[in-house]
Amino acid sequence: MDLRNFSDGTPTFEGGRKKASPVPAIIIMVLLAALGLFKGISGFFNESISLEEAFQNGISSGKSVSGEPAYGANHPNFEYSHKISGLPILKEYYYIIMSDDMQHGLLVRADKDFGENFDSDTYKNISGVEIKGNVKSTSRKVKENFSGSDYRILPNEYYIDLLSNKMSIRWLILGIYNALAVVLLTIHFIKNRGSAPETVVGKCIAGVMIVGALVCTYLLVYMLVQI
């Protein structure tokens, strides 16, 4: 703040706002970029096992299971809706799939239409659908729902996430966006010293960044509620 005396002898206070530092925003974006890239890339490099092996030996986190289930539920065995302050974010659908002898069952998370691959009476795989997904730990609510299920001693500690590839891609989008945002924000503050963009191109880029930030915020919430 400057105190200047003018010719009439009246003191005038002249103050200026201190420009906000971009450092906190850059740190947050760097962390989100690292998280997104790590979660996205690591999701494609889990150890692969066959579905038959999973039925026989069980499943655990860090594995990726693939194969053709002989039997499965024709409808979701459990639907789980995630909400924040009453606002629905997403709905999860869990199904039981079974081995050839119907003596072993596994839990999978899939989309709403997954059950259409199985006959409603015999539960046979009528479409020849093959599954592939990473093994994840079940949430408390899902675990409680399947506690005591028969099939056949259904392991409810873990499930096969058939949506894991989509999740990995979303994490990558989040990571790549934040990495680009860090670069652009750093360049902007170096060139313009924190001033608002004045050119049409600069304003367009700023608008795209704002829209991207809103989309990525939704993606982040969407994925975090599933962890």
Image (tube, helix red, strand yellow):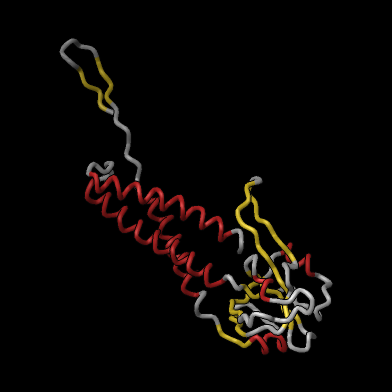
Quarter of the picture holding the N terminus: top left
Question: In the image, residue 99 lies at what x, y percent?
Answer: 73, 85
* Residue depicted at 70% across the width and 76% down the height: 118
- Asked if 71 appears above or below 111 in the picture, the reply is below
- Residue 225 placed where, x, y %? 61, 58
Q: Which residue is drawn at 32% across and 37% down?
A: 18
**Image spot of residue 70 (x, y percent):** 70, 84
| The residue positioned farthest toward the top in the image shown | 8
Q: Residue furthest left?
A: 7
| Residue depicted at x 47% and y 70% | 38
Pick the quarter of the image with the C terminus. Answer: bottom right
Residue 52: % across, % down: 67, 89
Q: Nearer the viewer, residue 186 or 133?
A: 133
Q: How many marks?
A: 0
Along the horizontal axis of the image, is 45 left or right of 123?
left
117 vs 175: above or below: below
- Residue ID at (27%, 24%): 14
Picture quadrant where residue 3 is located:
top left
Q: Nearer the viewer, residue 128 or 203?
A: 128
Reply above or below: 136 against 124.
Answer: above
